[in-house]
Image (cartoon, rainbow, N blue to C red):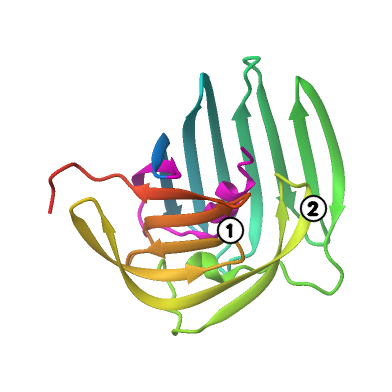
Amino acid sequence: MAMKGLFIALALTTSALAAAQVPLTVSVGGQQIGTGTYESKRTPNGGLEIRFAMRLQVGERTFAMSSVDRYDRRGVPLAEENMADTPSATQDRKSIVYGPRSARLMVVEKGKRTTRTVAYPKGASILQPSVLWFVRDRPKVGQRETHWSYSLGEMKWNKRTATYKGPKEVVIGDRRFKAHHISGEDVDLYVDDKGDVVRAEIQEGGTPVILERRVAAGKA
């Protein structure tokens, strides 16, 4: 099962002003296959750092992956790193650091390290103001932003759009959450008033992958 959508989802999602870790469950077809944590914090210069970790059990195989994303105070990406533990007990790693005119890509696979320069899309913006929605900014219903984002999973630039659809109640177990619906090409995100993740619905190869806030059973 490809997991690029999970990292795309977290690139759009935001969290609280202070460091706050949100425990998540991961489900496919109504079956829980793993757990995760999502944590973000504002940086001293007003930017944002987002950390995501996930462990999945698919059949007899266990997969672990994590990501770190950093943005400046405007929502311009500064750096991103994705890490994945492989069945052979090695750790593959991909990272990109954004500079004034180009980005520097590093890939470590099966112990081999390669680097290269990645040019920015000509005439396109990489500014992502939606990462600060409900962390600092309050978008209006229907507000939309479009940017280009480099996918470490696909190793290419993609044009992405985020739209604030409005408030939405989300039910998880016995709990009801007042959330805000942010929609992208293949992901629907629901965050609370501080930007903390409540639920993410990701279309992954035709099968929805659901990330939900983990709640204690029986809590109302």
At horizontal 80% and vertical 47% (from top left) the residue drawn is: 104
- The residue lying toward the viewer, choosing from 54 and 139, is 54
Which label is found at residue 71?
1
Q: Are marks 2 and 1 in contact (CB under 8 Å)?
A: no
Residue range of the region highlighted in magenta in the rendering: 1-29
At horizontal 38% and vertical 63% (from top left) the residue drawn is: 191
Horizontal side, residue 10 vs residue 124: left or right: left
Mark 2, Cα crowd under 10 Å, few <14 / some 14-19 / many 20+, is few
Helix, strand or loop for disc 2 = strand
Q: Is residue 163 above or below residue 99?
A: below
**Can residue 135 be seen in this snapshot?**
yes
Residue assigned mark 2: 156
At horizontal 68% and vertical 70% (from top left) the residue drawn is: 147
At horizontal 55% and vertical 33% (from top left) the residue drawn is: 65
Q: Is residue 138 above or below residue 64?
A: below
- Residue 113: image x %, image y %? 80, 27
Horizontal side, residue 202 vs residue 95: left or right: left
Mark closest to the chain's N terminus, 2 or 1:
1
Which label is found at residue 25?
none
Locate the N terminus and report the quarter of the image it occupies: top right
The amino acid on which the numbered mark 2 sits, given as a three-letter code, is Lys
